[in-house]
Image (cartoon, rainbow, N blue to C red):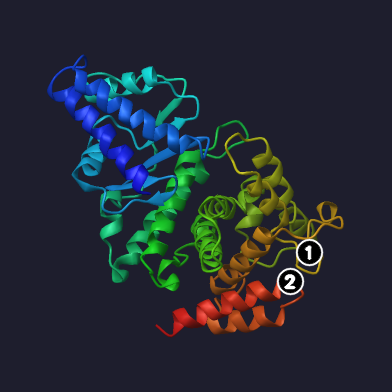
Amino acid sequence: MEKMKLFLSTLMSAISTCTLYSKEHASVDELTQKAFSLLGEMLQQSDSVELMIVGDDLIANKTPLRDVGMQGVNLVKRFKKKGLSRVDFIKGITFSELRLFVTNISAVSEDIRTYAHIKTGVVDVRTGGLKIDADFALDLESLSGFTSGQVGMVKDVYQGITPFKKLNIAGLEEIVVHFIITFRREANILKLISPVKSFSEYTYTHATNVAVLSMFQAEVLGVREDILRDIGIAALLHDVGKLFISKEVLEKKDALNQKEWDEIRMHPIYGAQYLAKLEGIPHLASIVAIEHHRRFDGKGYPKSALNNKTQHLCSQTVAIADFFDALRSRRPYRRALEIKEVLSLMKRETGGAFNPVLVDNFIRAMHSALSE
């Protein structure tokens, strides 16, 4: 990450020089050229360099940067003043584009322009009263407020889902990055799980909790950063097909009849079909949507989508998270189970519903959290 930090520091120096003197100043060209060279070296390793602003933290290629110095801090402030929370530098960028970007950012009253190889945007996420700037200052005793904010963010994204409207991908990424940062701070996983406050909020709370628990499992297993991000997004959307099920069935307080169960069991198909049509969504999201009610032993539903394929490893991870959170949450037709009760039931399903290795990994992690 040292090259990334040097690039950001040099880029901010170029912007500062442009602000203090003029865009024609020789030092602006010199510093921009140095930044361009560093960027070119990084783009030899990947197709893009992604920067995100989360609160006051700078995230580069999905990794939180520490000790970025005053130049890094100033760059965050500069981006915020422009209303930016994401900037992607894409392979193929020219020196002229980066030079224009520097002058564009340095000009206080100038709107952000459009570039062929620089994508800029604002992560539009409302937090239901929770200030994002305070998220990363929360101690473990304050995490209930943090998780409530995440549920609010998920609710905003979910309420914008229709067959005719583009999904807020940036909002999903923002939520995932928030949780990855929190994992890095070694928070007790059980303090990151939100309680269900009302039946109508179950969909959003459950999606949030399943994402937390799925990413947590992947983190413990040492999964790569890019895959961790995809798992998080897939887990957040695993039940998206339920938005196409009638509200009367979803929120029914009595036991479901056979026809209603048949309707509920269509949600994996609805979700996968919806996600497959969207741009920018990881392919993994559609796989998890169709497979999260499939079992390790090949049973489960929907029958038409099972064939003879083995359930994807990420779908197995989400299935464990889904089972755990569903049983520990109170529902209209049954009580919430204690965590140890859920783990005992999960153990009984080892080799049937769940991958034995993943279950053992999950149970060890939960016992560790319970003992803290």
The quarter of the picture where residue 27 lies is: top left
Q: Position of residue 64 (x, y in %)?
A: 37, 52
For residue 353, the mark is 2
Q: Nearer the viewer, residue 244 or 295?
A: 295
**Number of marks drawn:** 2
Q: Nearer the viewer, residue 171 or 247?
A: 171
Residue 2 located left or right of residue 323: left
Q: What residue lies at 34% left-to-right and 51% top-to-bottom?
A: 65
The residue singled out by tag 1 in the image is: 300
Report if residue 198 is visible in the image.
Answer: yes
Q: Position of residue 139 (x, y in %)?
A: 28, 67
Question: Contact (CB < 8 A) between labels 1 and 2?
Answer: yes
Report if residue 108 is visible in the image.
Answer: no
Q: Nearer the viewer, residue 142 or 176?
A: 176
Residue type at numbered disc 2: Ala
Q: Earlier in the sequence, mark 1 or mark 2?
A: 1
Q: Secondary structure at mark 1?
A: loop
